[in-house]
Image (cartoon, helix red, strand yellow):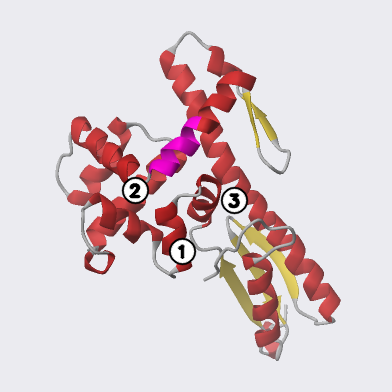
Amino acid sequence: RWKDRGGKVLCADLAQQEYRCLAHWSQCKVLLDAYAAGKDAHAATAALIFDKCIDDVTKVERDQGKTANFAIVYGRSPYMLAQDLSILRGKMVMVQEAEMFLAKYFENLPEVKEFQDRVWSYIEKYEYIQLPTGFRRHLPNIRSDDDKTVEEAKRQGFNTFVQGLSAQWCHAAAVTADRRLSESGLNSLLVFTQHDSLISDIYPGEEEEVTAIVKSSMENPDNAPYQSSVT
């Protein structure tokens, strides 16, 4: 909008929001400690899986830790995880090895498994998943006689909890940032959201103020149960 006058566009991205959500609601010590120390959660996960210091984790190992975290959030089966690991390692990974990989993950992050089991038990009991914000997704297929259909319903339910709350965090951040920008009397505007990012149109000379407002709004939106991080 103000490009011809030296205006700029700010793109602020929530860092690892799904895993911060997972860390908070599972109260997983490994993930919580990593974030509290300013460490990378994927590297912290890899360090435990590969039995090494986090500072010694290689990029490939870190990527495998990230893949394991994605597998939990998205409910990927050992077969699908084996395919993902095969691509990362550049060689075939058997399903049995992927199963062992997941077992090692849950062995070192037991709170995540306990949280996952609690979510699944809730779905089996009520046939839906409800977020703390009140959003509800019905999952009648949990009563199916087909095991694959049941597993899919469980995957959808767990993913809805983690990704749904992450998406709602971004929405809350947008509302908070828009209100704070309006109250500030600045000319800059929040223009839209994209996935877990907020895009702002900055009026010339307001860069520092807008960046501070947007960053604080995304890290601590109104009524947030924990603090996030922005890149």
- What is the number of the mark on residue 224? none
Magenta residues span 110-117
Amino acid marked by disc 1: Tyr
Q: Percent position (x, y) of residue 71?
A: 38, 41
Q: Percent position (x, y) of residue 36?
A: 47, 66
**Residue with the mark numbered 3:** 166
Cβ atoms at labels 1 and 3 below 8 Å apart: no
Residue drawn at point x = 61 percent, y = 59 percent: 226
* Separation (CA) of disc 1 from disc 3: 16 Å
Amino acid marked by disc 3: Ser
| Residue 156 visible in the picture | no
Horizontal arrangement in the rendering, residue 180 relative to residue 48 (left or right): right
| Badge 1 element | helix
Residue 190 inside the magenta-drawn segment = no
Q: Is residue 170 above or below residue 85?
A: below
**Residue with the mark numbered 2:** 67
| Badge 3 element | helix
First reached walking from the N terminus: tag 2 or tag 3? 2
* Separation (CA) of disc 2 from disc 3: 18 Å
| Nearer mark to the viewer, of 1 and 3 | 1
* Separation (CA) of disc 1 from disc 2: 18 Å
First reached walking from the N terminus: tag 1 or tag 2? 1
**Residue with the mark numbered 1:** 35
Q: Residues within 10 Å of mark 3 (few under 14, many from 20)?
A: many
Q: Percent position (x, y) of residue 169?
A: 65, 54
